[in-house]
Image: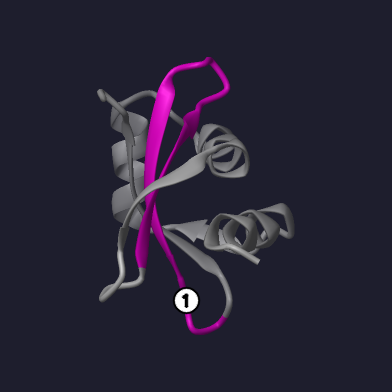
Amino acid sequence: MGKIDQIQALVRNGLYYLTEHADDEAGVDGFDIYDVEYGMLTGQIRRTWPQEEKYEIIGPALDGRPIGIVCRITLTGKVRVITVYEDQL
């Protein structure tokens, strides 16, 4: 199973959470938890930071805008969303 598949399986099972920073940053760009969830479930990994085990997922928000999500899988088997932003690339 690839990392995106693992992340998406955890998200489908509700095993994810946003840090306070991620929640704040999502709000700045007009995204909510449903946009973040949809972006993770339909997006793809664009970049990884192997030493930190972090992943950047790019996908669509519910309104079609590109959403960027940086996350990692915790030792307890949850997806920790570190930051969220409207992707400009």
Taking depth in this image into account, of 24 and 42 the one nearest to the observer is 42
Above or below — where is 27 with respect to 55? above
Q: Tell which residue pokes out farthest to the front in this image.
A: 1
Q: Badge 1 is on which residue?
A: 74
Amino acid type, label 1: Thr
Above or below — where is 3 with respect to 74? above
Question: Image quadrant of residue 34?
Answer: top right
**What is the quadrant of the C terminus in the image?**
top left
- Location of residue 82 in the rendering, given as x and y in whole percent from the top left corner: 34, 57
Colouring method of the image: one colour
**What is the quadrant of the N terminus in the image?**
bottom right
Magenta-highlighted stretch: main secondary structure? strand
- Location of residue 22 in the rendering, given as x and y in whole percent from the top left corner: 34, 49
- Location of residue 43 in the rendering, given as x and y in whole percent from the top left corner: 53, 38
The residue at 25%/23% (across/down) is 88
Magenta stretch: includes residue 67: yes
Magenta stretch: includes residue 71: yes
How many marks on residues? 1
Q: Tell which residue pokes out farthest to the right in this image.
A: 13
Residue range highlighted in magenta: 54-76
The residue at 47%/76% (across/down) is 74
The residue at 36%/36% (across/down) is 26
User: For the residue labelled by badge 1, is the local secondary structure a helix, a strand or a loop?
Assistant: loop
Above or below — where is 72 with respect to 85? below
> Which class describes the residues within 10 Å of circle 1: few (<14), some (14-19), or many (20+)?
few
Q: Is residue 45 left or right of residue 52?
A: right
- Location of residue 51 in the rendering, given as x and y in whole percent from the top left corner: 26, 76
The residue at 58%/59% (across/down) is 7
